[in-house]
Amino acid sequence: MFDTHELGRRPGALQRVSRSVEAPGSPATFGIEGVIGVPEGASVKLDLRLESVMEGVLVTGTARATAEGECVRCLEPLHQEVAADFQEMFSYPDADDRSRTRTAEPVDDAEDEDTLFLEDGLFDLEPVLRDAVVLALPMQPVCRETCAGLCSECGIRLDENPGHHHDAADIRWAALQGLAETIKDGEKDNMGGAEAGVDEKQEK
Ligand SMILES: [Zn+2]
Ligand SMILES: [Zn+2]
């Protein structure tokens, strides 16, 4: 809950607030279930700008936190900094009554639910933060953009096993390995080289 009493109700009044809050736990976490999210109790840093306007308080801000999840390609745990910008209007309950009677149009139920109100000068930012943070999270988080993921054949992590291949590709890799060993050992012993080296040896 945030207090707007210090801000007052004079339109045009401004107040900046910096505060850290703790991310809530289940079921209302700041995250995408099973994908990525800000863990319960983790610090969420808020920089807010409260602006008093005629019908209420306009809140503009940025939330910063570290989300945890796992890479969708290689399943390794990952941490990602998120910065979520948001802006929300919190109306005075009485101001809303006035605007409602002023407008001849019938009150739209969905729109009505979206209106957030100040209660005794307090507002609850948590639902706003949740929406903003979840929107800022990647739906397909990756440990890094170039993550090659897992081998579709055997499931090992390709980034940790460069050149890993199966079947026909395996033979080419073996040839390269054989070549590398040949360079290291010089000409004295390449008998232990790969099968692909056999042709060359026969020519000598
Ligand atoms: Zn990865
Ligand atoms: Zn494999």
Image (tube, helix red, strand yellow):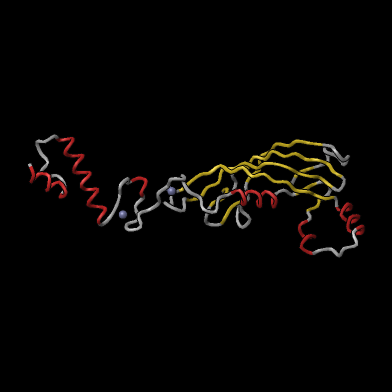
- Position of 128 with respect to 33 (left or right) is right
Residue shown at 35%/57% (left/top)?
152
Place of residue 116 in the rendered image (x, y in percent of width and height, measured from the top left): 78, 53
Residue shown at 92%/59% (left/top)?
101
Place of residue 164 in the rendered image (x, y in percent of width and height, measured from the top left): 30, 49
Residue shown at 40%/49% (left/top)?
148
- Position of 70 with respect to 119 (left or right) is left
Residue shown at 65%/42% (left/top)?
63
Question: Where on the picture, by quarter, is residue 14?
Answer: top right
- Position of 21 with respect to 76 (left or right) is right
Place of residue 109 in the rendered image (x, y in percent of width and height, measured from the top left): 79, 64
Place of residue 85 in the rendered image (x, y in percent of width and height, measured from the top left): 67, 44
Query: For the C terminus, which image quadrant?
Result: top left
- Residue farthest along the front direction in this orientation: 203
Image vertical order of residue 150 relative to residue 58, above or below: below
Quarter of the image where ligand 2 sits? bottom left
